[in-house]
Amino acid sequence: MPGEGRRVYIITGATAVGKTAVALCIAKRIGAEIVSADSRQVYIGMDIGTAKPSSADRKAVRHHLVDIVRPDEDYNVALFKDQALEAIEDIHCRGLNAIVVGGTGFYIRALWEGLTFQGVGRDDDVRAAIEAEIESKGRQAVYDELKRLDPEGAEKIHPNNIPRMVRALEVVRLTGRPFSEIVDKPAGKEGPAHEYSAICVDMDREALYRRINRRVEEMVHIGWPEEVARLIDEGFSPDLRAMNALGYREMVDYVEGVVSLRQAIDAICKATRNFAQRQLTFFRGLEGLKWVDVDPSIDTEAIVSSVEDELGM
């Protein structure tokens, strides 16, 4: 088959480190398509705050797993792994290269180590019964049942997030096990489905933090508050799991008048810097991942060349 034996390239790193720009340059050069490994860029309408590639970039290089679910729909690492592998197979079958790009560490690990997950299918009868209970007893009563059966899972689900509450109870009733024991937790390893070359782009911490601060300011300038206001106006609750994406909670507080814009920006910058540090700590635990230290003061071409060398292109 056309893609048989073709290597998959992975480019990861902390938020704002510049991995997307590097991946775009390489994709154009070698004839590749990009598979996003970002757990928030999957959500339709959440564009600015998730730093999605621009429409121009997506026209220049095809991106997979971007804008595929609504903010009120569930998405998890098991779905990502299955869909990423399908996308890679499709890319390879068309004789092209695949570059996986993103900073969601667990998504990268799922591919890199070939993690397996326990799948629990949908049961329309069970879901209908739960929805009928919500209608007759009220959402709080059904949420209280979830808290009794799965306290850990209930802590992560707001009572107003009915789709996720229904799914959690559905899993409990189908399996007899807490939703929190199953979702997003690997059941084992089957080994990687492809030969991967993977690098983590890194840079001096102070330089990275300055980039983070600048990017947050730019996101606000181009309309992040307006994006959040629109999502709320469209009926997407701030309590949705998707709206817990980095920075969105703080921007909701600004939109709702709880804090000033300056307070929101400062809080987002701090949270993003902390998140970047957690990302890097996670990536250091991935055995075999190569690291490329880049100097943000040099031109992109030089950075791209260093990355290509480490990837063995």
Image: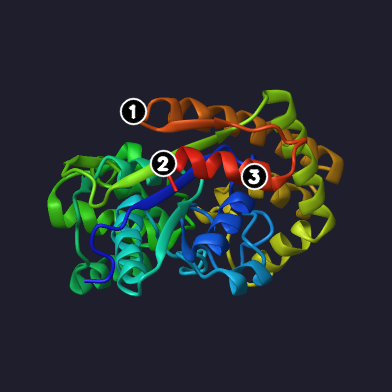
Q: Which residue is mark 2?
A: 198
Q: Give above or below for 73 relative to 221.
A: below
The image quadrant that residue 215 belongs to is: top right
Disc 1 residue crowd, few under 14, some 14–19, many 20+, Cα 10 Å: few
Indicate which disc, 3 or 2, sits on the residue closer to the N terminus.
Answer: 3
What's the residue type where badge 1 is placed? Glu
**Between marks 3 and 2, how big is the CA–CA gap?**
16 Å
Q: Nearer the viewer, residue 166 or 92?
A: 92
Q: Nearer the viewer, mark 3 or mark 2?
A: 2
Q: Nearer the viewer, residue 82 or 175?
A: 82
Residue 236: x and y in percent read 58, 65
Report whether 11 appears left or right of 82. right
Residue 164: x and y in percent read 39, 58
Residue 40: x and y in percent read 52, 54
**Between marks 1 and 2, how big is the CA–CA gap?**
11 Å
Q: Give above or below for 266 relative to 238.
A: above
Residue shown at 44% from the left, 32% from the top: 290
Where the N terminus falls, by quadrant? bottom left
Q: Which mark is residue 18?
A: 3
Q: Which residue is mark 1?
A: 287
Residue shown at 64% from the left, 52% from the top: 21
Q: Is any atom of residue 240 visible in this view? A: no
SS at badge 3: loop
What's the residue type where badge 2 is placed? Ala
Q: Which mark is residue 13?
A: none
